[in-house]
Image (spheres, rainbow, N blue to C red):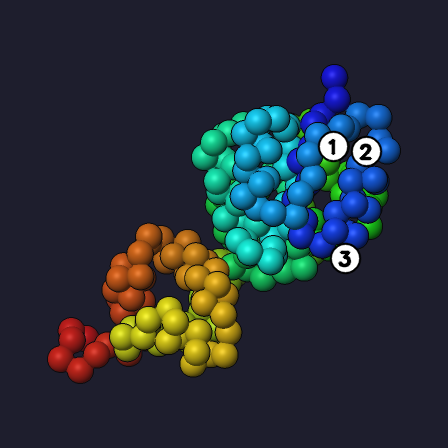
Amino acid sequence: MKTTVLMLDDHTLVRQSLVKTVAAEPEFEVVAETGDGDEAVKLADRLSPDVAVLDVSLGGASGLDIATRLKAKQPSIRLIFLSMHDDDATIHRALRIGADGYVVKTASTDELLLALRSVAAGGSYLSPHVARRVMEFASGPTSGRLTDRELEIIGLMATGGRISDVATTLFVSTKTVKNHLTSIYSKLGVSSGGQAIAEAYRRGLVPTPIGGSS
């Protein structure tokens, strides 16, 4: 029985090339391809593919957001992310969503096929550089520590900054700030901005406000 695949990438030439590569392998069947996240959710709901291959950065919604919706509807669907991003925040969120594979877009098509075969067999696959990053933040000496940028963000939020304010101050998008917050929450073991700020105060990561406890 063939492994059925849904391909989501908003770059038409890239998507068509990937579809051609995967469809040429006898063990796979590409049952749907699209560049639109909402359409991908509808197609997956109708066709129930075994594996979804998703670009993280789409023109509209994030591939991570689409993956969350896919998992909510079909918990058994296997997810492989394709991305130019290998920052901790993006990788953290992909893994929390339930990524079975994470392949950087600089990889070869052979590596994508290797990832598909591993995931289809019930395993997982991370591009070597991503795997090293995962090992570093999972068990390395920096595990649980906030990066300089994460410290900047939690510091700005502690002074009353909203996500939009933080993004403006740091000259980044609100999406980037939200991705960093996902990583911050994970590292601090919290689930909200208020909890993160309180934990940052407790750990001495940000200055205690005047009038606060020392």
Q: Position of residue 133 (x, y in %)?
A: 61, 57
- Asked if the residue at tag 1 contacts the one at tag 2, i.e. Cβ–Cβ closer than 8 Å, the answer is yes
Residue at 13 percent across and 80 percent down: it is 211
Q: Position of residue 152 (x, y in %)?
A: 42, 76
If the image is split into quadrants, where does the N terminus sit? Answer: top right
Badge number at residue 23? 2
Badge number at residue 106? 3
When asked about the image quadrant of residue 161, the answer is bottom left
Residue at 31 percent across and 61 percent down: it is 193
Please tell me whether mark 2 sits on a helix, a strand or a loop: helix
Work out how far the residue at label 3 is from the one at label 1, CA to CA, in angstroms. Answer: 22 Å
Q: Amino acid at mark 2?
A: Ala
In the foreground, 10 or 151: 10
Judge left or right: residue 112 versus residue 151.
Answer: right
Local packing at callout 2 (Cα closer than 10 Å; few below 14, some 14-19, many 20+) is some
Looking at the rendered structure, the number of numbered marks drawn on it comes to 3
- Hey, which residue is sitting farthest top in the picture? 1
Q: Position of residue 101 (x, y in %)?
A: 64, 42
Work out how far the residue at label 2 is from the one at label 1, CA to CA, in angstroms. Answer: 6 Å
Work out how far the residue at label 3 is from the one at label 2, CA to CA, in angstroms. Answer: 20 Å
Q: Amino acid at mark 3?
A: Thr
If the image is split into quadrants, where does the C terminus sit? Answer: bottom left
Judge left or right: residue 56 versus residue 206.
Answer: right
In the foreground, 129 or 114: 114
> Quick check: can you spot residue 203?
no
Disc nearer the start of the sequence (3/2) = 2
- Asked if the residue at tag 2 contacts the one at tag 3, i.e. Cβ–Cβ closer than 8 Å, the answer is no
Badge number at residue 30? 1
Q: Position of residue 13 (x, y in %)?
A: 79, 52
Disc nearer the start of the sequence (3/1) = 1
